[in-house]
Amino acid sequence: MNAGEASYLEGWENYQAVASYDRQHWFRLPTSYQDGKLTIVAELACETIQIAYFAPYSYERHQDLLAAVQTHPLVTLEHLGDTLDKRDLTLVKIGDGDTNKRNIWITARQHPGETMAEWLVEGLLYSLLDSDNANSRLLLDKANFYIVPNMNPDGSVRGHLRTNAAGTNLNREWASPSLDKSPEVFYVIKKMEETGVDLFYDVHGDEALPYAFLAGSQGTPSYNERLAHLRDRFSDALKLANADFQTEVGYEIDAPGEGEHDACNPLGR
């Protein structure tokens, strides 16, 4: 295999491929990388097997997710605009529209190969809409949610790892998006300016760090003590809500103003 020509070779370190016989249940396969060669060992229990980098999240499943959640009385789907390949960029709005509530934005899969991001959003949507979930009821009492499950449908269908149909990394377009290169970011920012944003949570997955952690907001020019306090409170709440979340492993922290200014570095206001 041409693993040695991959765009991010560090992603092969300690990596284990995923596989499935029924495309529903996924498991890991013994995998090794050496001298540019990726070796995957599989003892077949059936005649065919699907092997993937991460558990795939297909465009068909994306459409099924939108169709399923739109039947809930608190959900409205909004077409933000067309992608370069003329696919829908869809916003899932959850809440009663009360202007006195907070506005929480969540986006996922700017990098289409990071399929775990949309898996997370699928679970998030179903949890928010579960009337038996006390945490969700409390959140919806206090906030309206604006969720884009897939920021990059073109890249997802094309099989891209990090770019859209124009070959653009959407996560480097937030300073000056354009309809020619990054309409997905352009339309989302336009809608954000309309609704206002109290908390912005952009979901990614990392090839080399199999941990749940926060990253990015500290390097923004506007980062200050108030935002640092809000971030610490958010982090503490995540620790209580989910045992998978941790703060020991993550990215190096940038000093205020020294992060990537064109990247999406969300937190809150």
Image (spheres, rainbow, N blue to C red):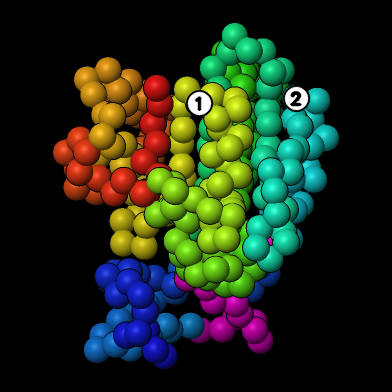
Q: Position of residue 30 (x, y in %)?
A: 39, 76
* Res 231 visible: yes
Q: Which residues are magenta?
A: 43-59
Looking at the image, is 4 positioned above or below residue 115? below
Please identify, in this view, whether the residue under mark 2 or under mark 1 is nearer the observer: 1
Instruction: First in sequence, mark 2 or 1: give its number.
Output: 2
Going by the numbered disc 1, the residue's amino acid type is: Val
Left or right: 76 in relation to 145: right
Number of marks drawn: 2
Q: Position of residue 214 (x, y in %)?
A: 33, 39
The reply to whether residue 19 is visible in this rendering is: no
Task: Quote the CA–CA distance across marks 2 and 1.
Answer: 19 Å
206 sits left or right of 178 in the view: left
Instruction: Read off the residue under disc 2.
Output: 74
Disc 2 secondary structure class: loop
Q: Is residue 269 above or below residue 27?
A: above
Q: Residue 209's mark? A: none
In the image, residue 236 lies at what x, y percent? 32, 24
Looking at the image, which residue is at 74% across and 43% down?
79
**Magenta span includes 49:** yes
Residue 172 falls within the magenta-colored stretch: no
Q: Quadrant of residue 166?
A: bottom right
What is the crowding at mark 1: few (fewer than 14 residues within 10 Å), some, or many (at least 20)?
some
Q: Secondary structure at mark 1?
A: loop
Q: Give the residue drawn at x 70%, y 48%.
A: 81
- Using the rendered view, name the quadrant where residue 224 is placed: top left
Q: Which residue is mark 1?
A: 197
Q: Three-letter amino acid code at disc 2?
A: Leu
Along the viewing direction, whichever of 73 and 191 lies nearer the viewer: 191
